[in-house]
Amino acid sequence: MRRGSVRGLNFGRRRKKINVPLLKEIGTWVIEIAIVLVISFVFVYFIGLRTTVVGQSMNPTIENGEEILVNRFVYKLKKPKANDVIVFLPNGNEKSHYYVKRVIGVPGDKIQIKNGAVYVNGELFDEKADTAAIEDAGLASEEITVGEDEYFVLGDNRNSSEDSRYANIGNVKREYIIGKAWFRISPLRKIGFIK
């Protein structure tokens, strides 16, 4: 064994220096990625629920097969109002497809359909969409009072819509409302906000 070559532990070795700027850079990247992931989750969960419209009940506003984004967060902050286009599960049936309709009456409103027109609290409803005269008033041929936490909804295609005029749908409970339909994402030629 030669002198000078010592095997085993050597406490005289120099420690490697930690590269502090590199660690700061890595830490910054980790924080930025975490923030992006949180923002993405919030956007997708609350604002980016995508659904496909089934049926012709909202023509011409939204047509069969069009894809829309649903804002699930907005109704946690405020209540739906007249003329909002909402997405809901009929009678809370989770096995059903989402229904898309326009809010006509809010809690406490009195709704009636007379001579093909919609009246809310005795006054002609201010329509935000072009609609035809209603041929079948259904339950609304007699005055309907909208209950607490309920909403009276109609499709914009009034003569081809299963909505609050009929007993199988009736007034929509707030707990069954998924959110507000706010943006059309397909087809590309019609992309834009829903009014």
Image (cartoon, rainbow, N blue to C red):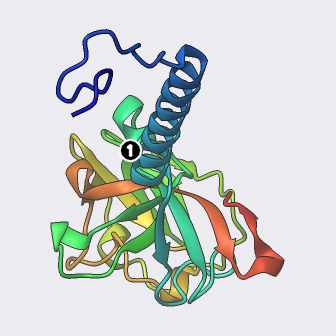
Residue 23 versus residue 32: which sits nearer the camera? 23
User: Is 155 on the left-hand or right-hand side of 87?
Assistant: right
Q: Residue at x 60, y 82 (%)?
A: 66
Q: Residue at x 57, y 69 (%)?
A: 68
Q: Residue furthest front?
A: 2
Q: Residue 62: in sight, yes or no? A: yes
Quarter holding the N terminus?
top left
User: Is 150 on the left-hand or right-hand side of 153?
Assistant: left
Q: Residue at x 34, y 79 (%)?
A: 138
Q: Is residue 130 above or below residue 119?
A: below
Q: Position of residue 123 (x, y in %)?
A: 56, 47
Residue 6 versus residue 126: which sits nearer the camera? 6
Query: How many C-alpha atoms fall within 10 Å of the one at disc 1: few (<14), some, or many (≥20)?
Result: many
Q: Amino acid at mark 1?
A: Val
Q: Residue 61: in sight, yes or no? A: no
Q: Residue at x 57, y 77 (%)?
A: 67
Circle 1 residue: 106
User: Is 155 on the left-hand or right-hand side of 132?
Assistant: left
Quarter holding the C terminus?
bottom right
